[in-house]
Amino acid sequence: GDEHALYVEFIAPLRGSGYTRSGEPDDILSVAGVTAQKLRYVELLLFEPWMLPLSAATGFDVEAEISIQVANPASYLAQKILSLPQRAGRKRPKDTLYIHDTLAMFGDELDALRGQAARVLQLLPLKTQRELQELRVTLFENKELVVRAAAMAMATGRENPPSADMISVVCTAGLAQVFKPQPQP
């Protein structure tokens, strides 16, 4: 409820099936009273992170300048695309909307992100590269998913929430521009 409160979400890599031998979900890590959600492809978020300096001069309430790491857009998009099929419930349309918003935010720079996206893809095994290429095309053909993402956007009170068709078009075209396979010399 406090508009000045800080919200931090911890994530950790999900290894294996995501279930214990007894069949219980194994998607939460707890260390010293702090919990973290386990997600697949988290290591991509640490590839070529952007360093963001925070200081009092830039409007942050810190005594000395600190730098934080922020996932670069290509890594963020790759992680979201690859993990989206395993996401459940409200997380799928929310992540779909995050993909749309990231592409919209960097719309003028999508061509510039291609080099970074190519380096991200090189981190992945060939099978996972093919999976990402397939998912970037097929995920946003799912009418139910994009309709739910559009409904979520509308529920947030945005001034101009994107329609389901707009989410589908932006995601399909934007991801093709960023992750389109580069011609081999």
Image: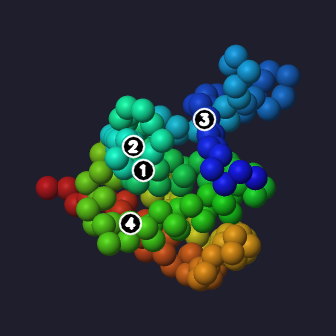
1 and 3 marks in contact (CB < 8 Å): no
1 and 2 marks in contact (CB < 8 Å): yes
Task: Provide the residue designation for mark 1.
Answer: 59
| Nearest-to-viewer mark from 1 and 3 | 1
2 and 3 marks in contact (CB < 8 Å): no
| Nearest-to-viewer mark from 1 and 4 | 1
Amino acid under label 3? Ile
The tag on residue 106 is 4
Element under disc 4: loop
Q: CA distance from mark 2 to mark 3?
A: 28 Å
Above/below status of 53 relative to 100 = above
Picture coordinates of residue 28, whole percent (x, y): 72, 30
Depth check: give the residue in front, 155 or 41: 155
Q: Evaluate whether residue 79 shows in this view.
A: yes
Which residue occupies 68% across, 19% down?
A: 31
Q: CA distance from mark 2 to mark 4?
A: 27 Å
Task: Provide the residue designation for mark 3.
Answer: 11
Q: CA distance from mark 1 to mark 4?
A: 23 Å
Label whose residue precedes the other's in the sequence (1 or 3): 3
Picture coordinates of residue 103, whole percent (x, y): 45, 67
Amino acid under label 1? Gly
Amino acid under label 2? Ala
Depth check: give the residue in front, 124 or 36: 36
Which residue occupies 66% across, 54% down?
A: 3
The tag on residue 56 is 2
Label whose residue precedes the other's in the sequence (2 or 4): 2
Picture coordinates of residue 30, whole percent (x, y): 72, 23
